[in-house]
Image (cartoon, grey):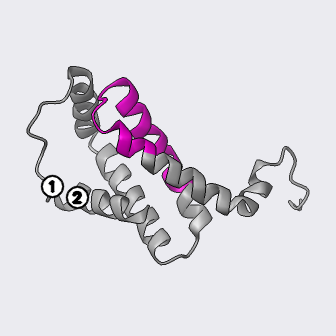
Amino acid sequence: MALPFLVAGLNGFLNFIPPPKEPMSENATLMLTAFMKSGYMFQLIAGTQLVSAILLLVNRFVPLALALIAPVVVNIVMFHIFLEPKGLGVAIFILILELYLAWSYRAAFIPMLGAKNSTVTK
């Protein structure tokens, strides 16, 4: 799971992957243009992908990496469902990998999912 995010994160800063030859849908183009014009969104996403990928690759802080990358994965899937159906298969595959790893590390997420946390001291 880390490799696609490592490549995407590096590409966000180094821009070495050429743009697709086929144009994207109008709405997909509008969304990506808005991200570019924000001045920070692409860098934030690329940085999140890069940090998460490195953590996954070195097998350190894996639950943190999975929590950090989860919103990116959800947005990739939603982007392909609603704006650009091409690439949906890869997005679903990445989602399945995320869910599998989250399930594998579920013990680390249990405290975070509790309604009350009794370990917090005042």
- In which image quadrant can residue 87 be found? top left
Query: Which residue is denoted by mark 1 in the rendering?
Result: 17
Q: Earlier in the sequence, mark 2 or mark 1?
A: 2
Which quadrant, please, contains the C terminus?
bottom right
For the point 23% across and 39% down, the residue is: 36
The amino acid on which the numbered mark 1 sits, given as a three-letter code, is Ile
73 sits left or right of 102 in the view: left
Image point 31% across, 52% down: which residue?
43
Q: Overall secondary structure of the magenta stretch?
A: helix
Q: Residues within 10 Å of mark 1 (few under 14, many from 20)?
A: few
Q: Position of residue 45 (x, y in %)?
A: 37, 50
Q: Is residue 18 left or right of residue 57?
A: left
Q: Residue at x 91, y 56 (%)?
A: 118
Position above or below: 93 against 122: above
- Pick the front one: 33 or 63: 63
Q: Secondary structure at mark 2?
A: helix
Asked if the residues shown at circle 2 and circle 1 are in contact, with their CB atoms under 8 angstroms apart, the answer is yes
Q: Is residue 36 above or below residue 8?
A: above
Residue at the disc numbered 2: 11
